[in-house]
Amino acid sequence: MANDRCAAVRGALLAFAPLLLVTGCGEQNRYVAPPPPKVTVAHPVQQAVTHYLEVSGNAAAVNSVDLVARVQGFLQEIHYKDGDAVKQGTPLFTIEPEPYQVKVDQMKGAEAAAAATLKQAEAEYKRQADLASRDFASKSTLDQALATRDSAQANLAQAKANTRSAEINLGYTQVKAPFDGIVTAHLVSVGELVGTSPTQLATIVQLEPIYVNFNVSEQDVLRVRAEMKRQGLTPADLKKVTAEVGLQSETGYPHQGLLDYAAPTVNTATGTLPVRALLPNADRALLPGYFVRVRVPVQKEANALLVPDVALGSDQGGRYVLVVNQDNTVEQRKVQVGPSVGSLRVIDGGLQPDDRVVVAGVIRTIPGQKVDPQMQDAAAAPAAK
């Protein structure tokens, strides 16, 4: 029995012997590092870029006038519908003209009488002058005739002035549009007595063209003046500068005009310079009082560096990009950013044209990490993930 058990053990050991031998002769297990992760990189895009001054402003009417009754009388007729667009010279209100027409007729009668008196005085003066030349009239008689003639001339001039004054008042009975514009709702009714004190009848507002007012900070004023000096521009050249305007509900700056005015002094209370642009506003998209976005070109850069917006990160130190160096190691590079151009962002400092910028997977990329960079066109960078 014991011999049979020993024989079984020996058989088992002999069966496992080849396996133990093979195991003892094999290689030892060791850790193999994974390959460096692939990251998408691109050189900065180089292109011409215009730097803009971007501010907020508000639209204002070029002309806005309260229509006021300049003579007293009952309002006889209203010639427009509230909100009508009217042309310059269009009659809007009529104040009873009859009393003023009567006054004109009276003044014209007085003018005719004065003209007749002057004619008679002139004839008398000529007779006396003829008689005096032949010693048939005294010097005093001639002087009297001359004084009468001169007095008649003065009376005629006064009569003409009275007639002109009466005609002007008659003209005031027709309240007309002083310029092309939109007339507001009337503030008085037909039959109402107006003109006993300054009586506002309505308001007319011109919408074409239209002003856009905005303020420029003192720092930006210094920057703009320095750039003008560099380009050899004069203050008169400001009126050739384009101003682009966009409403709060619009994308971009679809409305264009020209700078029209810049104040000669900086407001010491706000530290800003008032500036104004003039826009055609043919479609009347801008209304007085609208808040708008304004941008004005300040400087043109021939070879600006741009990177996709998705390549930019930020921390407490400011904005940065991740760059892969010559050793394929990721570095964090602080940059100064400029305006956006589509999906790209201008880099004003901190980057070189031959830098390899990480443009995809920025969040998963760690500074100091070895990577396998895959080149791509920066303009075709994928969206952030």
Image (spheres, rainbow, N blue to C red):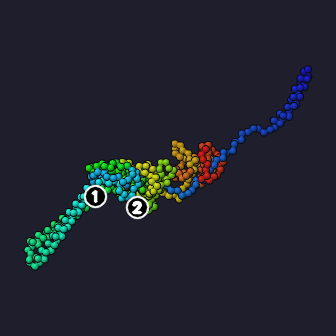
53 to the left or right of 13: left
Q: Residue at x 64, y 52 (%)?
A: 375
Position of residue 135 relative to residue 105, above or below, is: below
**Which residue matches tag 2?**
236
- Nearer-the-camera pick, 190 or 171: 190
Q: Nearer the viewer, mark 2 or mark 1?
A: 1
**Which residue matches tag 1?**
170
Q: Whole-percent x and y of residue 127?
A: 13, 75
Viewport quadrant of the C terminus: top right
Q: Whole-percent x and y of residue 226?
A: 43, 57
Q: Whole-percent x and y of residue 243?
A: 45, 56
Quarter-of-image position of residue 234: bottom left
Q: Whole-percent x and y of residue 63?
A: 37, 55
**Residue 227 can be seen, yes or no:** no
Q: Amino acid at mark 2?
A: Ala
Mark 2 and mark 1 lie on one chain; the one further toward the N terminus is 1
> Is mark 2 in CB contact (under 8 Å) with mark 1?
no
Viewport quadrant of the N terminus: top right
Q: Residue at x 61, y 50 (%)?
A: 381
155 to the left or right of 355: left
Q: Amino acid at mark 1?
A: Leu
